[in-house]
Image (cartoon, rainbow, N blue to C red):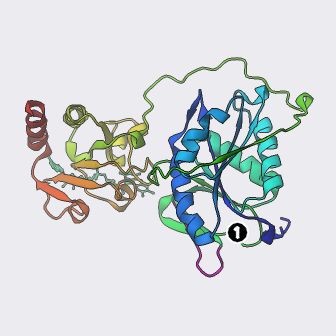
Amino acid sequence: MIKHDISKYKHIWVFVEHENGEVARVSFELLTKARELAKDLDCEVHAFTVGDKVEQFKDEVFKYGAKKFFIIEDPILKDYMTEPYRDSIVYLIEKYKPEVVLIGATTLGRDLAGTIATVLQTGLTADTTALDIDPKTKNLLMTRPTFGGNLMATIFCPDNRPQMSTSRPGVYKAIEEPVKGEVIKEKFEFDKAKYTKKILEKIIEEGEKVNLGFYDIIVSGGFGMGSKENMKFVQELADVLGGTWAASRKAVQAGWAPQTRQVGQTGQTVHPKIYIACGISGAIQHVAGMKSSDVIIAINKDPEAPIFELATYGIVGDVLEVLPKMTKMFKEK
Ligand code: FAD
C-alpha cells in the first residue's frame, strides 16, 4: 500500500445513501456520530453523495449538522451500479481529501466502500460498532466484532488517508442539530463506454424485511417463550403498544422467528425508547444489540437471570401469564 501525505487531509465525510428518493436512516446516524468525532478532530462534518437527482436531500443533510454537501448528479447514476458510483466518489475524495469517510454497512455501502478503498489505496474497517478518536495520535479508532463475534478488535489506519469505516445501522442515535449548509456541485466526465453492465429488471425479494431501528418500542421473545405458537403473545403486546417484535438468536435458531428480527451481535443493533425482553436470559451477545435502549423491561421466571442486571424494570414471573395480562391492560387503556 502506498503512503499518503496525511497532513493534506481534513474533515469528516459521511456518505448519504439513498434509494427511491429516500435517504437511509444510517446516514443520519453517522452524521450524528461524526459531529461528536469532529469535536475531537477539530474539523467539520460534511456529507456527500452521487445520483441522478440528489440535491433534494440537502435540507435533511443540513438538519443533521453537515456544513457542506458535496454532490455529483448525472442520469448514469440513477440506479446504484458499483463502477460509476465508485469513479465519481473517488473523484470527489481525491479532489477534497477528507480525513475520515464513513459509510453505512448496508448491502450497498459494503459493496461501495470496499471498491473505493481499493482504488484510493487506503485502509477500510468494515462493519464497525464503535468509533473513537485516539486522544494522542488523533487516529480514528474503529472497533468491530471478530472471530465469529467472540472478540472485539480495535483497528486504526496510521499512514493512509482517508480513514474509512462502514458502520452498522442502528448503532448510533440520529439526533438533529440543524446548520446552514452549503451545496457543492461537482461535474464528473464519465467514460460511458467503460460501463458495460446494465440493469435489465429489478426483482423485489419476497419475504419479511424489517428494520427494527425504526421502532420506538420493541417487544422481544427469547427461548423462554417455549414454542413458536407462544411468540404470538410477544407480537400481540407489540401490536397493542404500536411497536414491533423481535427475538433472541436462540428463538430464531428454534425457528420461532425469522433471522431478520434477531437482535444482538449477529443480528440487528437497536436503541428503542422501550425494549421488553420476554424469556431472554441476557447473554452478552444479545445484550450487545439492545443495551443502549432508553428503558429495558425484563420478564423472566428466574430472579437470577443476567438480564435483570441491565433492566430498568424487572418482572419475575412466567411470560405466558404476564404477557397476556399486559396486553389486556394496555388494550383497555
Ligand atoms: P436462554 O439463554 O435459553 O434463556 C431463556 C431464558 O428464559 C432463561 O433466562 C429462563 O430463565 C427464561 N424462561 C424460561 N421459561 C420462562 C417462562 N415461562 N417465563 C419467563 N422466563 C422464562 N444471541 C442473541 O440473542 N443475538 C445474537 O446476535 C447472538 N449472537 C451470537 C454470536 C455468537 C458468536 C455466539 C457464540 C452466540 C450468539 N448468541 C446471540 C447466542 C447467545 O449466546 C445466547 O445463547 C442467546 O442469546 C440465548 O437466548 P435466550 O436468552 O433466548 O435463551
In the image, residue 219 above or below residue 6:
above
In which quadrant is the C terminus drawn?
A: top left
Could you say whether the residue bearing mark 1 is in a helix, strand or loop? loop
Q: Residue drawn 36% across and 41% down?
A: 252
In the image, residue 175 above or below residue 191:
below
The reply, left or right, for residue 43 in relation to residue 307 is right
Question: What is the three-letter code of the residue carrying label 1?
Answer: Cys
Asked if the residue at label 1 sits under 8 Å from ligand 1, the reply is: no
Q: Quadrant of residue 88 in the image?
A: top right
Write down the region rendered in magenta.
130-138
- Image coordinates of residue 37 in percent, x first then y, are 57, 65
Q: Nearer the viewer, residue 257 or 159?
A: 159
In which quadrant is the N terminus drawn?
A: bottom right
Residue neighbourhood size for the residue with mark 1, other residues' Cα within 10 Å, grouped as few (<14), some (14–19), many (≥20): some
Magenta run includes residue 190: no
Q: Residue drawn 34% across and 36% down?
A: 257
For mark 1, what is the residue? 157
Residue 112 seen in this snapshot? yes
- Image coordinates of residue 198 in percent, x first then y, are 78, 23
Residue 146 seen in this snapshot? no
